[in-house]
């Protein structure tokens, strides 16, 4: 389990939610007014089953990654209204009877059951990500916090996974979004879930500390422009990497290298005077971090100042036994500049016989997203690492995932939510959900059945029906069957409780799931929809209930 | 000052940030690596001035509302790295010298000065929202948290204000976005800043408690479908509003009214059998909240079930001396349904002589945004209140505001950040900023001057220049002059410190500012850009510095 922000908490050793603001009051008022109406009607203990699911994959794609489960479990494990919270609720609902507030003080989630697909799984519309069962008044109170914890987590994990797919496995992906995220918690969640979805590191120190995610960062333009010139550097000494000698004037060493680069055959004439305040900033940064010198090269001019200055410092560091880490480009034509920079690095390698300099790391940032990385791939580029912020963490292309929380059964009576829009009709009954795999090892279809139907069997032919379209159906002979939802909070049932895995386990699982999908579901352009179905028996029941509940129209 | 979530805090009686996750570690790693490089170079105490500003108004508009200032001040007032935080930083930056961590342990913001435009003000691109001055290493550490606290706050406040402008002053605006917000803090911030930008209430209980914002809510579809029929109602008694009598069977009273409505002359034939589980849910809700009965009427069929059922319950409540609060529509054609519902209410008023029933409140929700409200206005509708969620809180139309934090001066030396993209060039120098008002009382132009230039004077002609476009300039004779930035954190200066106003004061100020703007800047379609300028002296200086810093190109 991930490092806990708030100590061990109460319920069964499960820590409290990472964000201390996630309390039972972080919900819509109507959950409390409904709880009161249930209580007044004596219905508050009615046993209800709700499905949490979404209706459409985000970003024009055909898959989603489920995130946010651990926080939901932390929330219910520690669910308890404090006296102060009850006092506030009394003032907010002044007409409610005392007995109700006594009831509210007494509730926890010990009689709630939560079944969920493992966090980090590839998931699809309509299939419940979570099934929540318990006293109706309590389950309603969980609706808003659960949605708030799952919606953005799943959205941003999916966004990160899409960036990983387009960038390819060999690239380093760095999340730089904290400053543009939707509030501080948006930033912390983004860092966590982007890592889960396949990023390698974040710039966010707090997220590094909370979740053990690798953190990265070098310097900004302001650092460069804070230097006026080389005179700003007072202490010019640098000890060699192995401690065997000491350079008394590292600044002069850098200047000598800059002169040599300028005169080197194939580089002669590519640049004139570089910016000396930039050179001072780079040198200063190298003196502070000789082992991990990475320079932002676009403050003045990438090819005529930043890259030559970087190379001079990198070559001087090399003399002292240190290996520079690379450069970052943060503006301009990244394809062109990365290619030109690579040529410059290769020329340095050749001119000075510096083996490996041509492979120096190039990081690119500046308003990157899935589309721009795709475009860079098509143009050809020499970028090794992408730093991605705004578009990644705010999910700019689609800022919300519409997860919903629907009643599907109460006191063993199946319930359906109708709508003129068929995509908004809910699938009734407490269900079981399975993923069926084909001969080639790919998942073929997800199927939902009634709770008491037998599980699909390997090698046995099974009819899978579209839940709402009667002509869409297919026979499947699964080669492998996985039940999708496991018990993460058993309540009063006797189910064993699934452990919450570490963030690195979830991340590996997510990468593994993505690898196992048939590629045409995952491609950016016109992906094939993955099939989601119901059993023949559930299909018939849905349509029986539908006709029963829907009023007959009347044309006038 | 708003109610504090976390007690009084340390600095000068200013409470801690609302979200306990807002700590000095909530920053990019490079702020710490730069701080180390400054420290190593002996530059960490260099006195730096940074501007926090944005480059472009969001949502295709020509104005922005500034939000987030109070949280920034809370942050710096309590800025102090704990021992645990220092320990984490040591592990994250293992090559840094001990002295640096001792320095980090020692810093606070007592020598930082913060000047800012008052929160809730109408603001424009390029003009600094905040000017932050202090030791360069400390100010860098503030960059990311300040941006994280201001970016989303300003974006969502602006979004709320735009919704208010399109809805008009007479409508009730309710923020319902918690479940779709980008994380729990996104939800809490959204509720706070939407209220600031002109909303009337939120569904978010935690935000209600933290900030004293009015909270609203009734019931969901799940509540309706949790009832099977009228037999679900066990206790059918209702005491009258004045306590003088008691109805032993309120359910029968409702049923009687439903029969009377069905038979009433002008309503006959408009509906047949209504859904009885819906009628049970409404009756039950009315028994719980007889004083504030508001029903969600679209679970089955608005006109053939929901509205007649609501009216039956409302009329029965009226018999007992209670006034129903209204209905909510959450699907379908809201313009059409609101108009039809209004007709139904008016018919009830006439048929039963129920004065005022025709004016019953109609709330609409379901994926509303600025565009759909505008479209509803054009079609004609009868909606009194809008409940707005996803599009409002995620700022779906533009999920990020690109605020930046740029070095403009160090040790009294002006600094400029160049870019091939002229809109990205920063305006150097510590500045003063004024808003100049014309004869009709509207703001005409904002002007930035050097720190030591005389302030613009009422009645005195002044040349205002576009900062980068030499042909754009205008003489202005201001009728009124306001200095925009005030001192919110004086540091070691002798400036008096501005008090932080309450959320209601900020909200009123914001509404007042919006009223004072010339309408053509505020309209949705092709708004006129508001002018932002620099003094002639500052203009000349910018261009002198620019030519000095930019390398001369070479065509080959």
Image (tube, coloured by chain):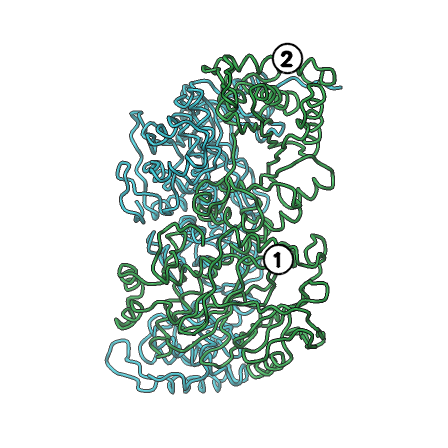
Chain colours: A cyan, B green
- The residue that label 1 is drawn on is B513
Spatial CA span between label 2 and label 1:
53 Å
Decide if residue B68 is on the left or right side of residue A234.
right
Q: What residue sits right under mark 2 in the picture?
A: B259
Q: Is residue A404 above or below residue B162?
A: above
* Picture coordinates of residue B244, whole percent (x, y): 51, 18
Q: Quadrant of residue A449?
A: top left
Q: Left of A419 or right of it: where is A403?
A: left
Q: Position of residue A261 (x, y in %)?
A: 46, 83
**Residue found at x 36% / y 41%:** A70
Residue A339 locus on image (x, y percent):
53, 69
Q: Nearer the viewer, mark 2 or mark 1?
A: 1
Q: Nearer the viewer, residue B328 or A508?
A: B328
x 53%, y 85%: residue: A272
Viewer-proximal residue, A156 or B399?
B399
Badge 2 vs badge 1, beta-carbon distance below 8 Å? no
Could you tell me if residue A386 is visible in this image? no
Q: Please state the total of marks drawn on the protein image.
A: 2
């Amino acid at each position: 389990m991930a490092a806990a922000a708030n100590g061990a908490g109460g319920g069964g050793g499960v820590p409290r939610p990472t964000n201390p603001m996630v309390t039972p009051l972080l919900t819509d008022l109507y959950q409390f007014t409904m709880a009161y109406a249930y209580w007044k009607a004596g219905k508050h203990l009615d046993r209800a089953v709700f499905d949490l699911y979404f209706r459409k994959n985000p970003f024009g794609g055909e898959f989603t990654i489920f995130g946010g489960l651990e926080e939901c479990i932390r929330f219910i494990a520690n669910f308890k209204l404090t006296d102060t919270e009850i006092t506030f609720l009394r003032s907010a609902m002044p007409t409610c009877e005392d007995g109700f507030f006594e009831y509210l003080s007494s509730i926890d989630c010990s009689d709630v059951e939560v079944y969920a697909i493992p966090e980090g799984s590839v998931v699809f519309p309509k299939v419940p990500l979570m099934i929540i069962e318990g006293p109706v008044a309590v389950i309603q109170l969980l609706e808003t916090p659960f949605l708030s914890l799952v919606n953005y987590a799943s959205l941003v994990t999916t966004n990160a996974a899409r960036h990983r797919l387009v960038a390819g496995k060999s690239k380093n992906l760095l999340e730089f979004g904290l400053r543009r995220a939707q509030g501080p918690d948006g930033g912390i969640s983004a860092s966590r879930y982007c890592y889960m979805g396949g990023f390698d590191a974040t710039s966010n120190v707090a997220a590094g500390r909370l979740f053990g995610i690798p953190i990265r960062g070098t310097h900004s333009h302001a650092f460069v422009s804070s230097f006026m010139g080389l005179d700003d550097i007072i202490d010019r000494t640098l000890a060699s990497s192995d401690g065997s000698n000491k350079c008394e004037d590292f600044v002069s060493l850098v200047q000598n290298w800059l002169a040599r680069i300028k005169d080197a055959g194939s580089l002669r004439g590519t640049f004139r005077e570089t910016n000396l305040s930039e050179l001072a900033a780079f040198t200063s940064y190298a003196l502070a971090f000789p082992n991990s010198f990475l320079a932002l090269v676009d403050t003045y001019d990438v090819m005529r100042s930043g890259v030559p200055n970087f190379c001079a410092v990198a070559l001087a560091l090399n003399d002292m036994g240190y290996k520079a880490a690379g450069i970052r480009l943060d503006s301009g034509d990244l394809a062109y500049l990365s290619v030109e920079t690579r040529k410059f690095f290769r020329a340095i390698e050749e001119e000075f016989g510096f083996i490996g300099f041509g492979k120096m790391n190039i990081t690119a940032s500046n308003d990157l997203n899935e589309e721009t990385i795709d475009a860079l791939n098509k143009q050809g580029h020499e970028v090794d690492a992408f730093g991605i912020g705004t578009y990644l963490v705010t999910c700019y292309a689609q800022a919300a995932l519409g997860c919903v929380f629907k009643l599907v059964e109460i006191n063993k009576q199946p319930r359906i939510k109708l709508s003129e829009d068929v995509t908004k009709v809910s699938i009734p009954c407490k269900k079981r959900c399975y993923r069926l795999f084909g001969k080639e090892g790919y998942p073929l279809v997800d199927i939902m059945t009634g709770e008491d139907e037998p599980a699909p069997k390997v090698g046995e032919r099974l009819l899978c029906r579209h839940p709402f379209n009667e002509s869409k159906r297919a026979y499947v002979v699964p080669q492998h069957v996985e039940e999708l939802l496991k018990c993460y909070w058993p309540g009063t049932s006797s189910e064993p409780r699934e452990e919450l895995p570490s963030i690195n386990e979830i991340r590996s699982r997510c990468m593994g799931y993505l690898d196992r999908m048939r590629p045409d579901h995952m491609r950016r352009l016109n992906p094939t929809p993955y099939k989601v179905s119901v059993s023949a028996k559930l299909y018939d029941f849905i349509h029986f209930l539908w006709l029963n509940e829907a009023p007959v129209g009347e044309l006038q």
